Amino acid sequence: MRSWLILGISAISLCACASDQKFPVLEPAKVEPPTTQAQTTPPDGCPPQININIASEEELRCLPGIGLERIDDIVQGRPYWAVEDLLKKKILPESIYEPIAGMLVVN
């Protein structure tokens, strides 16, 4: 895609030089890097990191966006070899996983 864009811009530049017509100057588009959601910090009284293999139901309740049904899914899906297993096993959707991923560990 990028090579086609460069080829197109080059062709326009050549045409502009070869003719007496004036063409607007094309400036490269500014591309912003993708933003990641801010890491959610745990509420007061909750551990900063939660081991999803051994966490109690109470500890799992500390995770924002995790209700009783998802807690049950997390417990039933054990054991986990990596935090990303929550996505691979389809325990959590990415929209819930991403903000809390930094709070999760597997030991």
Image (cartoon, rainbow, N blue to C red):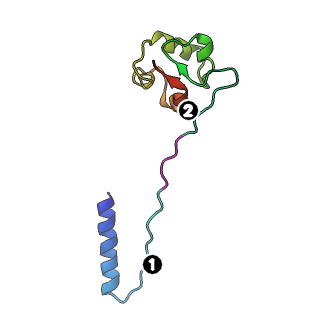
Query: Is 42 left, or right, of 80 in this rendering?
Result: right
Compared to residue 11, the image places residue 19 above or below, namely below
Dividing the picture into quadrants, the one containing residue 90 is: top left
Considering only order in the chain, which callout, 2 or 1, is on the residue closer to the N terminus?
1
- Between 35 and 5, the one nearer to me in the picture: 35
40 lies above or below 21: above
In the drawing, what numbered circle is on residue 99?
2
Where residue 35 sits in the image (x, y, percent)? Answer: 52, 46
Q: Decide if residue 25 is on the left or right side of residue 11.
A: right
Lateral position of residue 10 relative to residue 85, left or right? left
Residue lying at 45% horizontally and 78% vertically, measured from the top left = 24
| Marking on residue 75 | none
Question: Around disc 2, counting alpha carbons within 10 Å, would you say few (fewer than 14), some (14 to 19), or many (20 or more)?
Answer: some
Residue drawn at x 30%, y 86% as measured from the top left: 18
Residue 33 is inside the magenta segment: yes
> Pointer 1: what residue?
24
Compared with residue 36, is residue 62 higher up or lower down, i.e. above or below?
A: above
From the image, which quarter does the N terminus lie in?
A: bottom left
